[in-house]
Image (cartoon, helix red, strand yellow):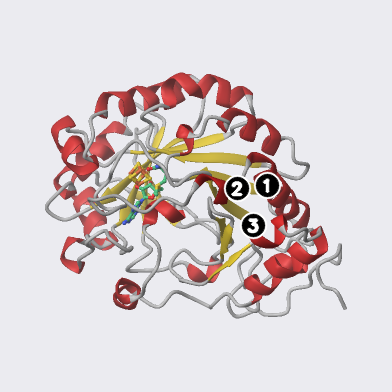
Amino acid sequence: MNGYTSRTYVRSCSSLSEDQPKDNSVSDMLVDSFGRLHTYLRISLTERCNLRCQYCMPEDGVELTPRPQLLTKAEILRVANLFVSGGVNKIRLTGGEPTVRKDIEDICLELSNLKGLRTLSMTTNGIALARKLPKLKECGLTSVNISLDTLIPAKFELLTRRRGHEKVMDSINAAIDLGFNPVKVNCVVMRGFNDDEICDFVELTREKPINIRFIEFMPFDGNVWNVKKLVPYTEMMDTVVKRFTSLKRLQDHPTDTAKNFTIDGHQGRVSFITSMTEHFCAGCNRLRLLADGNFKVCLFGPSEVSLRDPLRNGADDRELREIIGAAVKKKKASHAGMFDIAKTANRPMIHIGG
Ligand code: SAM
Ligand code: SF4
C-alpha cells in the first residue's frame, strides 16, 4: 500500500507520543516509527549571513554552496506545498539570515497562501528587519523570533564579529509596535560571556511584551563548544528566581521546546530552551529543509537526504513524498546526548538554521 496518499494516520505507538494531540489530518508521510506527528517545518532560505556569530560559525567562515545548487523560490514552494498538504501547519523561515534573501517578501506571500498553513514565522538576527517588517507582515508573516545575546554593544561586536546592536534593538521595538505579540527574543547563554546579563534580559520583560528565551549553548561543527561554557537551565533559573521571586512555570504544550514562565507584574515572559540538559525529543514535531534542498529529520543527527536532486530529475509528487516519508520513518527516538553530539560530524549551525 502506498502510505503517502491522502490516507490519514491512526496513532499506533503510545510510549513517546502519549501527550501529542490527536490530529487526523496528518498524512503517514509525516509520522515516524515512534508515532510522532511532524507538523512543523523549518526552512533555511540561505547559507549567507550579515553577522558572524562565534557560536554559530567558524571564524574563517563556512564554505558556501554554489548558487545554482540552492533551491529557487519555485522549488521551495513546491516542496513546502507537499509538506503543508501532508499536514504541516507551521513553517519557520531561518538561515543563515533569512532577511538577506532578496525574494523574502515573495516567499512569505506565497507560503502564507498555502491552504492549511496556520503559522508563518521567521528567526532573524534583526539587523535588517526593522525596515522590512511592515511589508513582511503584509505578506503574511505571523510571528518573529529575534536573536540577541547581549545588551552591551561592545560585547555584541565581539560575539558577532560585526556592528549592529542598535539595529537589533530597533527591530525588537518595531516588532512590538507592529503588534507582534509576543516578540520572541532568542538569547544563547554562554558562561563567562553573557551569563551575568540574564537578569538584565529578564528586566526587559517588565515593560515590553517580549518573550526572552534563554537557550543552552549547543555544539555544532566549527563553533568551539565546550561543556564549561554551557550554563545548564537549572542554574539559569536559580539566577532568575533569586531576583524575580514570583517566577511561575506555565503549563507547556507537549511539542514545546521551551519551558515557559511568568513573573508577577511583567508584561512579557521568560523561557528556557534546554536542548542539552533536558532534551525534548519525545515531543519533537520538527523537520528541516536546508537551503541546498537537503532534508533533515533531526537538528543533531547528521543524516540528510536530497530533495533537490530528485526534484530536478523530474520526480513527481508521489515520489518526493515517498523519499520524505522514508526519511521520517528513520528518525531516531532522541539525540545522542551532548557529549556524543559534540563528537559527531554535523553541519555548522549556520547551514542548518536552528
Ligand atoms: N540568522 C538568524 C538568527 O540568528 O536568528 C537565523 C539563523 S540562527 C542559526 C537560528 C538560531 O540559532 C538563533 O537564535 C541563534 O542564536 C541560534 N544558535 C546558533 N548557534 C547556536 C548554538 N551553538 N547553540 C544554541 N543556539 C544557537
Ligand atoms: Fe548569522 Fe544567525 Fe548564525 Fe549569527 S546565529 S551567524 S546571525 S545565522
Asked if the residue under mark 1 is in contact with the one under mark 3, i.e. CB atoms within 8 Å, the reply is yes
Viewer-nearest residue: 133 or 279 = 133
Q: Residues within 10 Å of mark 3 (few under 14, many from 20)?
A: many
> In which quadrant will I find the C terminus?
bottom left
Is the residue 221 above or below the residue 117 in the image?
A: below
Residue at horizontal 36 percent and vertical 29 percent from the top: 127
Where is residue 5? Give x, y as percent. Answer: 85, 65
Q: Please tell me whether mark 2 sits on a helix, a strand or a loop.
A: loop
Whole-angstrom CA distance, mark 2 to mark 3, is 7 Å
| Residue type (three-letter) at the residue carrying disc 1 | Glu
Circle on res. 71: 2
- What residue is rendered at 32% in x and 72% in y? 338
Amino acid identity at mark 2? Leu
Q: Which residue is mark 1?
A: 75
Question: What residue appears at the point 73 percent right and 79 percent down from the top-left corner?
Answer: 12
Q: Which residue is mark 3?
A: 308
Residue sitting nearer the eye, 53 or 279? 53
Give the mark nearest the N terminus, 3 or 1: 1
10 Å crowding of disc 1: few (<14), some (14-19), many (20+): some
Indicate the position of residue 21 as horizontal and vertical percent values: 67, 62
